[in-house]
Image: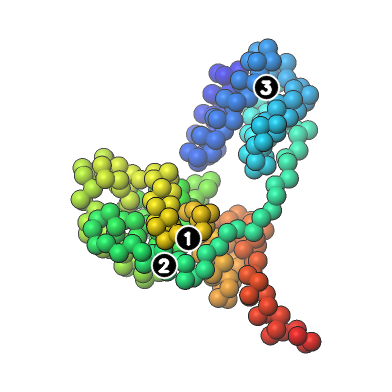
Amino acid sequence: MKETIDGFIRYIRYEKAYSENTLKAYSEDFESFLQFCDEAGISGFGEIDYRVLMNYLTELSERRLKASSLERKVASLKSLYKYLIREGLVRKNPADLLSSPKKEKRLPSVMEKSEVLDLIGSISGEDALSLRDKAMITLLYASGLRVSELTGLDIHDVDYTQGIVRVTGKGSKERIIPTGETARALLVRYMGLRNEFGPVQGDHALFLTRLGKRISDRMIRYILNSYVDKLALRKNIHPHTLRHTFATHLLENGANIRVIQEMLGHSSLSTTQIYTHLSPEKLKESYDKFHPHA
């Protein structure tokens, strides 16, 4: 079974061009699934039916996994079985009967403009590390990047003349996003000191660690948390919060939702529409302005 799953992973890597993050997540999902099958005495896909898959998902539910994690595990099984059918490795598709658990819809956490300014303003040093951190955090907010997109940026992805950044997002789709003058100026200053990060390890990564290696998602989360803690801001601020804040602030200031969809790299408008929520203050302001009996 493992060899078959390894073949599937190669298929989605090279033929479907899945992102490294998705490949890693799917690999972890299948490792969990193979362990379940081994403990259940299952040695081949021909022994797996709908009941077996449901027992597996029930066991995962009992571990109190988040609905989003369960949804991904269902998606990984469905993708695997489509591959197995296509390759003629199984005749029936028990995963086709699985339904994804409903995710609890929560409004994204958003920062106030003053909080963003305080956060960016708290990084005051002129050394290479401080300029790197300030440029990264400013760019997350100014361009609404996913943290994986930020770490994936290379030097040539930034056009300083036009003030834009070329991003490769989910599904290897490329899009162009403005950086804004503040982020552009910070990037210019950072690039002037970038060579101080030790010997660069053979690639053209925009943001580097002290040792000259491409910075990781985890390191960016750690860096952001360190500045958030110093300011005693809300504890639930993470890199994606800056992306949420980017979209919400644009909408609140009158930007077209289709333009925001394009900048965020959402394939579906419905995904972007979650940002159409308004703060209680904005709701009250709109109500007082437009309701005839307010």
The residue that disc 2 covers is: 118
Which-is-in-front pick, marks 2 and 1?
A: 1
Residue 273 in percent (x, y) is at: 65, 62
In this view, the residue in front, 238 or 93, is 238
- What residue is rendered at 47% in x and 67% in y? 115
The residue that disc 1 covers is: 233
Q: Quadrant of residue 182?
A: bottom left
Q: Quadrant of residue 198?
A: top left
Q: Earlier in the sequence, mark 3 or mark 2?
A: 3
Question: How many labels sit on residues?
Answer: 3
Residue 247 in percent (x, y) is at: 55, 64
At label 2, which amino acid type do we have? Asp
Residue 76 in percent (x, y) is at: 63, 34
Pick the quarter of the image with the N terminus: top right
In this view, the residue in front, 279 or 76, is 279
**Considering only vertical position in the picture, is 64 above or below 231?**
above
Residue 67: assigned label = none
Q: CA distance from mark 2 to mark 1?
A: 10 Å
Q: Secondary structure at mark 3?
A: loop
Which-is-in-front pick, marks 3 and 2?
A: 2
- What residue is rendered at 72% in x and 40% in y? 100
Q: Earlier in the sequence, mark 2 or mark 1?
A: 2
At label 1, which amino acid type do we have? Leu
